[in-house]
Image (cartoon, rainbow, N blue to C red):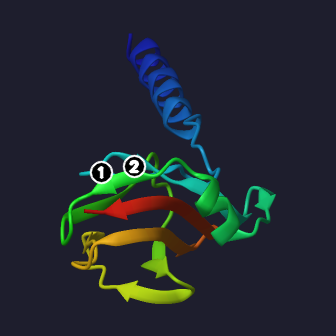
Amino acid sequence: MKYFTTLFLGLFSIVLLAGCIGEDYDYSPPSVTLSHSEIKLAEANINWEDGTVKEADSLELAREQQQVTVKAGQENFVNFDSQDFEILDLTVSVWRDGEQIQLDVNRLKEFNFPNEKGEYLIEVNLTSDFGTAQYVGNILVD
């Protein structure tokens, strides 16, 4: 009887460990949305560990995106659809009339849109332990 108990516990342990090892993770670059305004940003330039490489003129791509209206000074949050990576650096900036304005991003990935009304192109740059990614969009601050 002791032999069968030992055998059963051994097989149970192997099956349990196999389930933990067999997990599947998605290591592709994440999609990005700005949560409070529900803006889905377009992928511009990507260089990711899984082999994904994408190069685009980021400002031209941003101009091509559907313009979304946001409130001046509104707080927003950078949301990744998956986050199986460590964020090493995250920056958010807006472009207006060829001038780049860096927005403050806190450790919770929150930032505020500019207080000055007008048309802007938004750019989010991510540096992670899996590579770099840039996302862009077109906003109207009202």
Q: Is residue 39 left or right of residue 63?
A: left
Q: Secondary structure at mark 2?
A: strand
**Cα distance in 3D space between marks 2 and 1:** 7 Å
Tell me the amino acid under the disc marked 1.
Ser
Q: Residue at 58% x, 73% y: name it.
A: 129
Report the mark closest to the observer, 2 or 1.
2
Q: Position of residue 49 (x, y in %)?
A: 72, 63
Q: Residue at 77% x, 56% y: name it.
A: 52
| Picture layout, residue 25 above or below residue 125 | above
Q: Secondary structure at mark 1?
A: loop
Numbered mark located on residue 35 in the image: 1
Q: Is residue 17 visible?
A: yes
Q: Nearer the viewer, residue 79 or 42?
A: 42
Q: Residue at 52% x, 24% y: name it.
A: 15
Tell me the amino acid under the disc marked 2.
Ile
Identify the residue under disc 2: 39
Quarter holding the C terminus is bottom left
Q: Within 10 angstroms of label 1, few (less than 14), some, or many (20 or more) residues?
A: some
Q: Position of residue 48 (x, y in %)?
A: 71, 63
Q: Position of residue 130 (x, y in %)?
A: 63, 67
Q: Nearer the viewer, residue 131 or 14?
A: 131
Q: Position of residue 1 (x, y in %)?
A: 38, 9
Q: Within 10 angstroms of label 2, few (less than 14), some, or many (20 or more) residues?
A: some
| Picture layout, residue 42 above or below residue 75 | above
Numbered mark located on residue 133 in the image: none
Q: Residue at 27% x, 77% y: name it.
A: 114
Question: Picture quarter containing residue 25?
Answer: top right
| Picture layout, residue 4 above or below residue 141 | above
